Amino acid sequence: MDGVADRPSPKIKLMTPLQYAHKPSIDLLAAGGVTGIMDPVAPGIPVGSDTGHLALLGYDPHVYYTGRGPLEALGAGIDLQPMDIAFRCNFATVSDDWTVVDRRAGRISDEEAEQLSSVLVNLSNRLSLDAEVMFKHTVEHRGVLVLRGDNLSEKVSDVDPHKEGVKVQMPRPTDSSENARRTSEVLKEFLIKSKEILENHPINIERRKKGQKIANALLPRGAGRLPNLPLISERFGVKGAVVAGGAIYKGVCRAAGMDVINAPGATGTINTDLESKFRTAIDALNRYGFVLLHIKGTDSASHDKNPELKARFIEKVDMTLGKYLDKIPSDVIICLTGDHTTCSTVGEHRGDPVPILIHGQGVRIDEIDRFDEFACSKGGLGRIRGLDILNILFDLANITKMYGE
Ligand code: ZN
Ligand code: ZN
């Protein structure tokens, strides 16, 4: 559960959402399992969902992280090649002098963004510099941009200024290489051409008529190349799969060599179809040795500074888990945790440790019968690192090979 851990909030009787929520099924797993707290990367280091998930899968982000762009691109279904340069990208509203009016383009719908992105598909042919540019819409105003060609570099600055009311910063090389200079130029030309095209798109003409903000610019950021991860199958000898709504989670898992299984109705929002996700994940256990089920709503409610909603959403997850618990084969090791703390008082990720529980045959059941930040801190696992979770799980499943002879 993304960002499931929290700090006590005055809005819910100075409890955390995990303490405040009524969650009999999750607590049942805690009672029959072993619990602890976990630092995704290291104590006190707030991580993003990208670095957090890399760590949960055992990849030290200090070694393997190459930026969010390539992970988003993989998650969006692009077959990223080692030479490609990938960016995260927002549709935005900018004025004639490229001042950012709205970083989310008046919160355009998925359908509108999809139609707008279709006109960008063939734009590469009209660029003077020789490079292929791919844009793919993901959710709401978000998408990914990939540059493909020879002699490109990830050493280009963010175009997105990350705030409104300031001018867009056209891409600049961040080192002195010819490739970085060339990449900046390709990107700049694409951005200028795409703005011309987007401004006259029927969707934007219609939005202008209705007095809505138009989506007339793309703001790329987070340039990077495909990370080179040792695959789950090589590390543990089993195939892995992920069930998730958001692109970034699918992307991290694809980079680790896992398959993406799409659950109908999985949106990566608080209104996602949890039943569909649980069904899909449990079904995948028939074909895969490792399945990651990612649930985003806990993080979203925290960013909205709504601990009450977060607690209600945890209850929804708990109810769904309750329905499916007896469908999970008894030889499955279940682990429940989060990728970081998201504090619903400040609305941001924090470096506090995250509760974790492990349930299944052979675990050393402790005395903890609740899954929350306080109870789990007294659990039998103690305080562990995110990097060690998969080793612990595969060891419990009797899959891990002995080190030494
Ligand atoms: Zn996260
Ligand atoms: Zn978050």
Image (cartoon, rainbow, N blue to C red):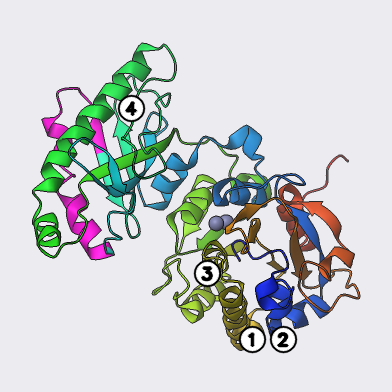
Q: Amino acid at mark 4?
A: Pro
List the residue tagged with mark 1: 322
Circle nearer the N terminus (2, 1):
2
For this rendering, which residue is in front, 389 or 306? 306
List the residue tagged with mark 4: 171
Residue 301 visible, this orientation: yes
Q: Which mark is residue 386?
A: none
Q: Position of residue 246 (x, y in %)?
A: 45, 60
Q: Amino acid at mark 2?
A: Pro
Circle nearer the N terminus (3, 4):
4
Alpha carbon distance from label 4 to label 2 = 52 Å
Circle nearer the N terminus (4, 2):
2
Asked if disc 2 and disc 1 are in contact, CB closer than 8 Å, the reply is yes
Q: Position of residue 29 (x, y in %)?
A: 75, 78
Which quadrant of the frame does ligand 2 lie within? Answer: bottom right
Q: Amino acid at mark 1?
A: Gly
Q: Quadrant of residue 404?
A: top right
Alpha carbon distance from label 2 to label 3 = 19 Å
Q: Quadrant of residue 20?
A: bottom right
Asked if disc 2 and disc 3 are in contact, CB closer than 8 Å, the reply is no
Disc 1 on helix, strand or loop? helix
Q: Which mark is residue 24?
A: 2
The residue located at (42%, 27%) in the rendering is 154
Q: Quadrant of the C terminus?
A: top right
Q: Position of residue 330 (x, y in %)?
A: 72, 78
Q: Does 189 sit above or below residue 306?
A: above
The residue located at (54%, 71%) in the rendering is 281
- The CB of the residue at mark 2 lies under 8 Å from ligand 1: no
Q: Is residue 48 left or right of residue 21?
A: left
Q: Quadrant of residue 27?
A: bottom right
List the residue tagged with mark 3: 297
> In front: mark 3 or mark 1?
3
